Amino acid sequence: MARVFVWNCNLPRLPSAWRDQLRDLGTYISGALFTLGWWVFIDGLVMSRSTTEVNFGFEDWLPGLLCTLGMIITNSIDLSLLRDDGFGYASGGLAGKAKLTLFIGIALLAGGVAGSVAILAIKYIVPQVDAHVLYIGVTNVVQTLCLLMASVVLWFVHNSEHDNNYNFVLN
């Protein structure tokens, strides 16, 4: 099977000391985004206790939990496992299992973001609630987007094949 390059990004060559610091900085940024996402959600949870118009239920917790689980699954996979040509899961290849696990992680992340947008629309926008109550629904979307961005940042800083080159490949 031929590989098709989707995007080849040559990054500027950095001194080796800067590369290590860039990885550390990316890890810190990812952690800050993760913390910010959950902090905003908890702020919305606290705000919901002061209003009686909308109750905060399990459906409000679920998108953040799905995104957190998706982040853990996605970032637990080493990029070198995905480089193998074998795609089939039935063949018993490690690459196929890693690709399936990565797909599940990305699906959880996307499902969490889509779920938070759906909850915002169904629970907060359609009933035309007040702006201070709408903030509670917006916190859920902000949380999942922060978790998605934290996962992307962490993936890029820890899974670069070369220090100055990153390739996106379709198999």
Image (spheres, rainbow, N blue to C red):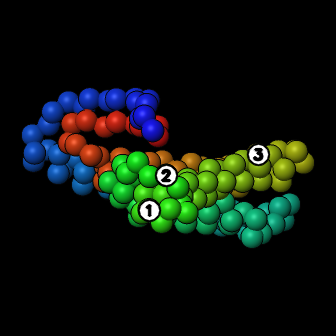
Q: Is 82 placed left or right of 119 in the picture?
A: left
Q: Residue 2 carries which label?
A: none
Residue on which the image places disc 3: 131
> Which mark sits nearer the N-terminus, 2 or 3?
2
Q: Is mark 2 on a helix, strand or loop?
A: loop
Residue 53, image quadrant:
bottom right
Q: Is residue 98 visible?
A: no
Neighbours of disc 2 within 10 Å: few (<14), some (14-19), many (20+):
some
Q: Which mark is residue 93?
A: 1
> Which mark sits nearer the N-terminus, 1 or 2?
2
Residue 86 rendering spot, x and y as whole percentages: 44, 52
Please name whichever residue, 164 or 142, is drawn nearer the observer in this view of the structure.
Answer: 164
Q: Is 170 placed left or right of 21 in the picture?
A: right
- Kind of residue sitting beneath label 3: Ala
Query: In the rendered view, would you say 38 is above or below 17?
Result: below
Neighbours of disc 1 within 10 Å: few (<14), some (14-19), many (20+):
some
